[in-house]
Image: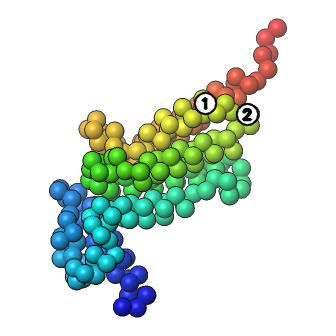
Amino acid sequence: MTRSDAVENRSLILSVVEEAIKSGRRPLPTMSDIVKASGLGRGTVYRHFADIGELFFAYLQDGYTKLCCTYEPEWISGGRAVLRKRLQEFLTLYFRFNIENHTLLSSPECLTSEGLQLAKNELRRKIFVTATLMSDTPLKPIELSKWADVMAHCVETGHLMSCHILEARSEISVGIAMNLLDQFLELNEASAAPNSST
């Protein structure tokens, strides 16, 4: 098998997983399901992924890596309005990815996985950095961490599913997160302003 064949086969396997997960199918697909749907030989699939856990991990890792590469606040110029718009776009993509992959993300193996925690940490870091770059006054890191955590929860769909508010659309959840960001920055600037009363 050539290198390009191996890359194509890996991509095919991951696309089969994506289709199975986005369909909301329960239970999650097995390795046998993936082999059958891909049309590849069992040995070929197992050469790429030793078991279903490794396959699911690779699928999520690829997804979150592609997603997180779409927004790096430290590299964006253009001021506060541009940063806010780009963060909003990123949060929308993040929310949609989570909704599309909820079946996998809500599995016990995934909920306790290191990979999911790393994605959540990266989400909070991006919010934290964006708020820092948008603020005209210094921010208190502990306060900002608390607000970033609440903003991140708006686009992490696990709690939305458990509360049966899946009908929440990305524009609603992301809108709440962006309103929280604006409110936090306003409160911070107001508290940093010199007291004008005498």
Instruction: Tell me if mark 1 has few (under 14), some (14-19) or many (20+) residues whose alpha carbon lies within 10 angstroms of its own.
Output: few
How many numbered marks are there?
A: 2
> Residue at coordinates 74% horizontally, 33% vertically from top-left?
137
Q: Is residue 17 left or right of residue 183?
A: left
Residue 189 horizontal/vertical position (percent): 70, 29
Q: Where residue 16 sits in the image (x, y, percent)?
A: 28, 72
Density class for disc 2 (Cα within 10 Å; few <14, some 14-19, many ≥20) is few
Q: Amino acid at mark 1?
A: Ile
Task: Tell which residue pokes out farthest to the top in this image.
Answer: 198
Q: Which mark is residue 91?
A: none
> Circle 2 sits on which residue?
138
Kindly tell me whether residue 163 is visible in this rendering. yes
Location of residue 68 with respect to 151 vertically, above or below: below
Q: Nearer the viewer, residue 108 or 27?
A: 108
User: Which residue is labeled 1 in the image?
Assistant: 142
Looking at the picture, how far across and down is residue 183, in whole percent? 58, 31
The three-letter amino acid code for the residue at tag 2 is Pro
Is the C terminus in the top left, top right, bottom left or bottom right quadrant?
Answer: top right
Residue nearest the observer in this picture, 80 or 64: 64
Taking the spot 57% from the left edge, 57% from the top edge, the residue there is 71
The residues tagged by marks 2 and 1 sit, at their Cα atoms, a distance apart of 12 Å
Q: In the visual, does 151 lie left or right of 36? A: right
Q: Which residue is rendered at x = 41% and y = 51% of the image?
A: 114
- Place residue 97 in its image quadrant: bottom left
Secondary structure of the residue carrying tag 2 is loop
Q: Which residue is painted at 18% across and 70% down in the image?
A: 33
Q: Is residue 102 visible?
A: no
In this rendering, is residue 54 above or below 173?
below
Of the pair 3 and 60, the residue shown nearer to us: 3
- Quadrant position of the N terminus in the picture: bottom left
Q: Secondary structure under badge 1?
A: helix
